[in-house]
């Protein structure tokens, strides 16, 4: 009986000890789980703290940038106001500059120059500017009328005319530079304009003369048979009834007309013709005197 009690007691003790140990291990597992959960929470809090610190720094920087932006906006408003003022001043200066250029071009038109040397080396004397534009300039000079490219004018002329330059940096337009013409009629033609743009000399057109041109008289018919009393001397032939006539390859040439010339003044025989007449008549007088002395 006692042995059974001892065995039963020993079994009960073993059961109680096993149960206590099992509970102890279960508590350790739960504590470990709590510790892991606490560590994860701590890590999460640390991450949130770091992100919060970053946001705080970013907000500080944003606040600083916003303050700087306000300052920059204030400066920009001042700069915009100054830019508007400068643009208005620039417009006024451009207007004055354009009016000065137009006045200089108008003053150049019709100006008389004693001598001008082009960039091509051509010299024009007593040159008067009849018309000028961005491409062609017309000069009336001592040798006639010439059209030259405006680009071939001297540098001081280019500085005054300022063709191809627009105040404000805009591109020049052909309509913004009108052609300045003088009081005389326009002498430009399409062919001469193309020749002038190509740098070629324009053929000079002769100006009409004030004195009318008189048609030349027809030459006399060549003398084929000798005429009684005809004499020759110094390339001239004296024919009775016609007077002295010059001889040429085609025959006798009619003497100059004694009628009034184109200017209305009467013409006179030249001194050479009168001397030839005197020399040719002197032998005839000697023959007459000899015949009277001999009695024939």
Image (cartoon, rainbow, N blue to C red):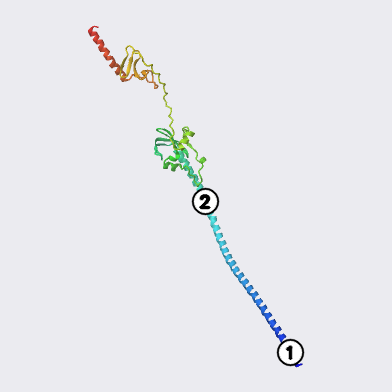
* Image disc number at residue 85: 2
Return the residue at label 1: 7
- Which residue does the image show at 44% across and 42% down from the upper left? 158
Residue 159 percent coordinates (x, y): 44, 43
Left/right of residue 252 with respect to residue 97 in the rendered view: left
Q: Earlier in the sequence, mark 1 or mark 2?
A: 1
194 or 75, nearer to the observer: 194
SS for dot 1: helix
Q: Which mark is residue 278?
A: none
Left-right relation of 234 to 98: left
Place residue 12 in its image quadrant. bottom right
159 w.r.t. 224: above or below:
below
Where on the picture, by quarter, is residue 140?
Answer: top left
Location of the N terminus by quadrant is: bottom right
Badge 2 local density, few (<14 within 10 Å), some, or many (20+)?
Answer: few
Position in image of residue 264 (x %, y %): 39, 21
């Amino acid at each position: 009986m006692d042995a059974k009690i001892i065995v039963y007691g020993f079994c009960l003790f073993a059961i109680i000890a096993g149960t206590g140990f099992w509970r102890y291990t279960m508590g350790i597992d739960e504590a470990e789980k709590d510790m892991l959960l606490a560590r994860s929470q701590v890590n999460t809090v640390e991450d949130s703290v770091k992100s919060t610190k970053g946001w705080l720094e970013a907000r500080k920087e944003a606040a600083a940038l916003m303050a700087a932006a306000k300052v920059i906006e204030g400066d920009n408003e001042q700069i915009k106001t100054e830019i508007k003022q400068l643009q208005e001043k620039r417009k006024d200066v451009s207007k004055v500059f354009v009016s000065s250029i137009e006045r200089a071009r108008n003053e150049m038109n019709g100006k008389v120059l004693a001598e001008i040397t082009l960039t091509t080396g051509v010299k024009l004397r007593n040159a008067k500017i009849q018309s000028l534009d961005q491409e062609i300039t017309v000069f009336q000079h001592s040798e006639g009328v010439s059209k030259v490219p405006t680009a071939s004018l001297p540098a001081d002329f280019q500085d005054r005319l300022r063709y191809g330059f627009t105040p404000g940096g805009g591109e020049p337009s052909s309509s913004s530079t009108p052609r300045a013409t003088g009081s005389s009629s326009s002498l430009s033609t399409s062919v001469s304009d193309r020749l002038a743009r190509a740098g070629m000399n324009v053929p000079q057109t002769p100006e009409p003369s004030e004195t009318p041109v008189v048609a030349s008289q027809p030459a006399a018919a060549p003398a084929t048979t000798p005429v009684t009393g005809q004499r020759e001397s110094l390339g001239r032939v004296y024919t009775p009834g016609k007077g002295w006539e010059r001889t040429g390859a085609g025959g006798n040439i009619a003497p100059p007309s004694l009628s009034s010339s184109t200017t209305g003044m009467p013409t006179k025989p030249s001194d050479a013709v009168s001397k030839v007449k005197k020399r040719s008549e002197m032998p005839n007088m000697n023959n007459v005197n000899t015949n009277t002395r001999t009695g024939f």
